[in-house]
Image: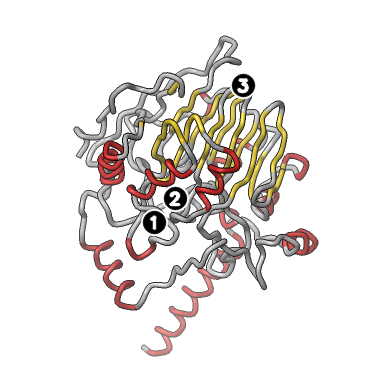
Amino acid sequence: MLLFLLLTVGLLTGSVVLFMQFAPQFGAPPAGQHLEQLKKSQNYGSDQFKNLVTTEMNMSIGQMTGTMYQWLFEDNGKAPKKPLPTRLAEPHQEDHDSITQVTWFGHSAILLEIDGKNLLIDPMFGPAAAPVSFLSKRFPYQQAIDLENLPEIDAIIISHDHYDHLDYPSIRYLKDKTNHFFVPLGVGSHLKEWGVEVSKINELDWWESFSFEGLALVATPARHFSGRKFNDRNKTLWASWVICGNKHKIFFSGDGGYFNGFKEIGTKYGPFDFTMIECGQYNENWAAIHMMPEQSVQAHLDVQGKVMMPIHWGAFSLSLHSWKEPVERLLKKAGEENVTACFPIIGQPLDIESPPATANYWWVSHE
């Protein structure tokens, strides 16, 4: 019996190792000359990228045990009980050079139309925010998002390489439908592994900018981390993004804990006409890498935003709070701070110059 158990454990361990070694969704960390180039970044430490401020992510055994128990045995409304409403629009057929609008697809996946260009941000359209489907399934939607209905994409912007932002099946589908990828340092290694041509990939360090067909794209700091395996923590950089057009300036926070970097971004590039700021998947045990909703509002104020849209919710349950708690807390804080916040239905285009006068509480009827 002991021999049988040992063989079983050995086979399982070997299978996991082989799976992580060869399954394509894990991507590939930077290596060789690419890695040597990354090490020249002032944001690269002894063997990995680092945050601008001390950022601890280690939980005690007691915290880990308590979190696991809550995850397995306490529902707490972490997922909606019926499909979320959608209002998927057809691609623009007319000239839209004068339009600046955003379409939120749930979580942090966004289509930004600005100055006649279509930018797809963190295009996570896959069924699971994990390397295997049973770990974190997408919430059901009334209407599935059909990538065939996306307009022609001019560029894709990625904030970091976590599964809920950099999705293997989505990139595989989109890689031949766009000619430009803008990513933080090192993330290009995953894209190349998945068949994206090197000539399409533009890697940026924090505060580096790229002029793209009249738009200025700037990779700005965030307080987070990266990695797709057990052994590649922080081997690629993470970032927030500033997008400056002829008329409007947009801020996309990516993922991260609250830090004074938001004020620096606001000083250098604000004020912003529209901000898309993380709000969801938070917990006191990992507050250093994910903001609380009240901090999301403060981040919007720090970057000098005019109108904000909360993101990083409405698609996956990656924490212990109820699926709609983030926006309920944010809405309360926004009211206290006199901040204009908008909550479009999934797939509903939103003109940033004409945000709804009052909040659309579409989530209330979806327990």
- Which residue is label 3 attached to? 115
Which of the two residues, 188 or 334, is positioned nearer the viewer here? 334
Of marks 1 and 3, which one's residue comes earlier in the chain? 3
Q: Amino acid at mark 2?
A: Ala
Task: Give the CA separation, mark 1 to mark 3.
Answer: 39 Å
Q: Quadrant of residue 61?
A: bottom left
- Which residue is label 2 attached to? 129
Which of the two residues, 104 or 342, is positioned nearer the viewer here? 342
Kind of element beneath mark 1:
loop
Residue at 34 percent across and 42 percent down: it is: 139
Q: Position of residue 120 (x, y in %)?
A: 56, 33
Mark 1 or 3: in front is 3
Q: Residue furthest right?
A: 33
Q: Position of residue 147 (x, y in %)?
A: 51, 30
Q: Amino acid at mark 3?
A: Asp
Q: Residue furthest front?
A: 267
Task: Kindly identify which numbered label has been placed on residue 135.
Answer: 1
Contact? badges 2 and 1 (CB < 8 Å): yes
Q: Position of residue 21 (x, y in %)?
A: 60, 65
Of marks 2 and 1, which one's residue comes earlier in the chain? 2
- Please tell me how crowded label 2 is: few (under 14), some (14-19), or many (20+) other residues with Cα within 10 Å: many
Residue at 40 percent across and 83 percent down: it is: 5
Kind of element beneath mark 2:
loop
Q: Residue furthest bottom?
A: 2
- Please tell me how crowded label 1 is: few (under 14), some (14-19), or many (20+) other residues with Cα within 10 Å: few
